[in-house]
């Protein structure tokens, strides 16, 4: 087992200890321990199939771990479901975003949390609040009345993030928020993450494949390999070259093992 260089953290918003997960004969996670502090952005990287998305699903209550413990503000919690995790302040934004394309921006912002007045939707209240909150986060949307299907990928991602933040998320898990985005849209999402970091009241774990983007916005980076965290470093203490070489070395080792097989 490789022992990562661990970066100490004074106050953890979320901490996972010795998390493991198997799917039949396949071991997805072996012995995962990680932590993220309030106001901190943690980058989680690793090759495809390393277990990153499985770990996020455990942390947001979608799947239970086979073993290990999860702590929220130093208190152990057993996450029973995604809704239970959200009620505790843990929310995840996945690539599919869980937005309804036919609905307007403001209706998506308040999906399942609609403002109601006299048993009717209070569209005026939701429209005003959505516009105000998007403006506060620096998210530029032409109109909150537009259906989200007419927005760019970056704008849709920003809406999903804003919805989580304003539903009182204190731990935000972002699964590949920059996937298939151009430079301009990626810059918008990175700027949004940087703004949230400045606020200091949200802990963020972000999965990404672009190491340069990870190092730009994240305070620390964890490398997940073969179901284990093998590196935990401050972004300032590592580099794109180091991270790339670690992943390439893993690929070379796997290739050599395959070549040895009869």
Image: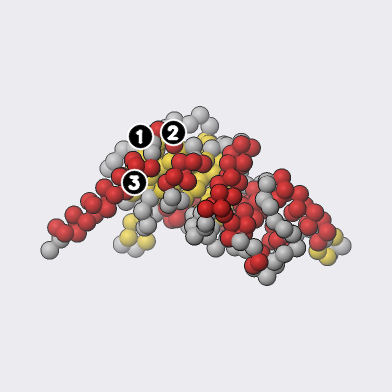
Comes first in the chain, label 2 or label 1: 1
Q: Which of the pair 49/193 is nearer the observer?
A: 193
Comes first in the chain, label 3 or label 2: 2
The label number, if any, that marks residue 236 in the structure image: 2
Q: Is residue 193 visible to the viewer in this orientation of the structure?
A: yes
Badge 2, how many Cα within 10 Å: few under 14, some, many 20+? Answer: few
Q: Based on the displayed image, in which of its 4 quarters is residue 238 positioned?
A: top left
In the structure shown, which secondary structural element does the residue marked by tag 2 occupy? helix
Q: Looking at the figure, which quarter contains the N terminus?
A: top left
Mark closer to the observer (1, 3): 3
Q: Residue at x 43, y 52 (%)?
A: 209
Q: Which of the pair 206/241 is nearer the observer?
A: 241
Q: Residue at x 49, y 41 (%)?
A: 216
Q: Based on the displayed image, in which of its 4 quarters is residue 108 positioned?
A: bottom right
The label number, if any, that marks residue 180 in the structure image: none
Comes first in the chain, label 1 or label 3: 1
Q: Which of the pair 113/49 is nearer the observer?
A: 49
Coordinates of residue 196 in the picture (x, y in percent): 61, 42
Using the numbered discs, state the Cα–Cα distance from disc 3 to disc 2 in whole angstroms.
16 Å
Is residue 95 depicted above or below 236 in this figure? below
Mark closer to the observer (2, 1): 2
Coordinates of residue 66 in the picture (x, y in percent): 40, 53
Q: Which residue is mark 3?
A: 244
Q: Which residue is mark 1?
A: 5
Is residue 125 depicted above or below 220 in this figure? below
In the structure shown, which secondary structural element does the residue marked by tag 1 occupy? loop
Badge 3, how many Cα within 10 Å: few under 14, some, many 20+? Answer: few
In the structure shown, which secondary structural element does the residue marked by tag 3 occupy? helix
Q: Is residue 261 left or right of residue 101?
A: left
């Amino acid at each position: 087992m490789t022992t990562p260089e661990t970066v100490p953290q004074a106050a953890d918003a979320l901490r996972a200890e010795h998390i493991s997960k198997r799917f039949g004969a396949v071991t997805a996670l072996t012995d995962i321990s990680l932590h993220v502090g309030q106001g901190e952005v943690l980058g989680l990287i690793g090759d495809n199939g390393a277990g990153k998305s499985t770990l996020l699903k455990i942390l947001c209550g979608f799947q239970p771990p086979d073993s290990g413990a999860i702590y929220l503000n130093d208190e152990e919690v057993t996450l029973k479901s995604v809704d239970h995790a959200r009620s505790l302040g843990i929310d995840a934004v996945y690539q599919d975003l869980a937005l309804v394309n036919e609905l307007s921006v403001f209706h998506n912002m308040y999906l399942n949390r609609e403002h109601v007045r006299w048993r009717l939707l209070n569209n005026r209240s939701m429209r005003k609040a959505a516009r105000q909150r998007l403006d506060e986060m620096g998210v530029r949307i032409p109109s909150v009345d537009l259906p989200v299907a007419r927005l760019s990928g970056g704008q849709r991602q920003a809406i999903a993030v804003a919805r989580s933040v304003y539903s009182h998320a204190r731990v935000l898990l972002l699964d590949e928020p920059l996937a298939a985005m151009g430079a301009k849209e990626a810059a918008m999402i990175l700027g949004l993450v940087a703004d949230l970091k400045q606020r200091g009241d949200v802990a963020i774990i972000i999965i990404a494949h672009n190491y340069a983007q990870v190092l730009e916005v994240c305070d620390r980076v964890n490398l997940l390999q073969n179901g284990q965290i093998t590196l935990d470093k401050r972004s300032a203490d590592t580099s794109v070259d180091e991270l790339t070489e670690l992943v390439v070395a893993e690929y070379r080792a796997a290739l050599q093992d395959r070549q040895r097989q009869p």
